[in-house]
Amino acid sequence: MSNNLTPILEFIELDAEQNPVVNEQGLPTLLQRPIAKNIPELISKGKIDNLDMFAELHAQILQWDWAELYLNYLIDLIEIEEHNANLPEPYENDEGEVINVQPLPLPEAPERPPLMTPTEVLEPYQKHINKLIGIEFKGVQVSLNESNQNGLSALKSALELAKEFESENEFFPVNFNAETRQGVKVLTLVDEAEFKNFGLQFVMARKAFFE
């Protein structure tokens, strides 16, 4: 059994001589596994500043999942080997046929998955992350979400109305409440040229996610 424990040495309790601590069956005890954050939940809340750290932890958790599978494999292996070692002798049934009880097939050890990088862990969520990060304008990192798009549309409509009443000179400067991954931040737009510049950058960046 000791050779069978080699693949999971880093996941099990060891004694002072670095030998596995096992029970009467020769089974080890797994160390306490780390606790990881739920990455999709963090992203949905906009908490992406430390995602690489949490992604690295998630990659470790996947290794622990495999270690638990491997321990279950060892348990099955012991049970089946014990069963096969105590098979009944061949016997004759009522029809005079000799019955040989066949041993159960041994289970296969689960293959250890490669350790994922933080980039690989986050790859399924990267599009959403990039939308949260958004574009930088005048020191504010504006998320490329629908709420900000609606805010820009409302501001554009308000500007057109101001122009209709020849009050555009009184419209600027105007504050845009931009949603960012750190919450709402005020982005001050000093004139129409700056407003159009910001709007164009936002629309083009957001458009790229739908192509």
Image (tube, helix red, strand yellow):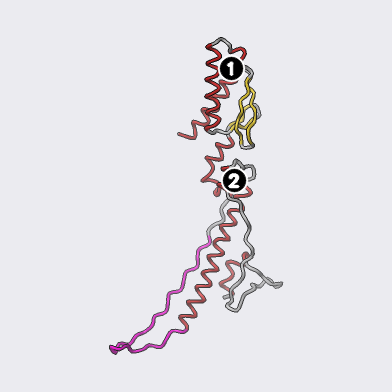
Q: Is residue 184 left or right of residue 74?
A: right
Q: Could you tell me which quadrant the C terminus lies in?
A: top left
Q: Earlier in the sequence, mark 2 or mark 1?
A: 2
144, above or below 95, in the image: above
Q: Position of residue 34 (x, y in %)?
A: 63, 58
- Judging by the rendered image, the residue that carries numbered circle 1 is 192
Q: Judge by depth and name the residue closer to the eye, 135 or 171.
A: 171
- Magenta stretch containing residue 116, yes or no? no
Neighbours of disc 1 within 10 Å: few (<14), some (14-19), many (20+): some
Judged from the image, the secondary structure of the residue bearing numbered disc 1 is helix
- Judging by the rendered image, the residue that carries numbered circle 2 is 42
Q: Position of residue 6 (x, y in %)?
A: 59, 69
114, above or below 209, in the image: below
Q: Position of residue 144 (x, y in %)?
A: 55, 33
**Residue drawn at point x = 57 percent, y = 46 percent:** 41
- Magenta stretch containing residue 95, yes or no? yes
What is the span of residues highlighted in magenta in the rendered image?
86-112
**Residue drawn at point x = 55 percent, y = 17 percent:** 159
Q: For the residues marked 2 and 1, what is the alpha-carbon distance in whole angstroms?
A: 37 Å
Residue type for callout 2:
Leu
Looking at the rendering, which quadrant does residue 5 occupy? bottom right
**Residue drawn at point x = 65 percent, y = 28 percent:** 186
Looking at the rendering, which quadrant does residue 7 occupy? bottom right
Residue closest to the far top:
166
Q: Judge by depth and name the residue closer to the eye, 131 or 115.
A: 131
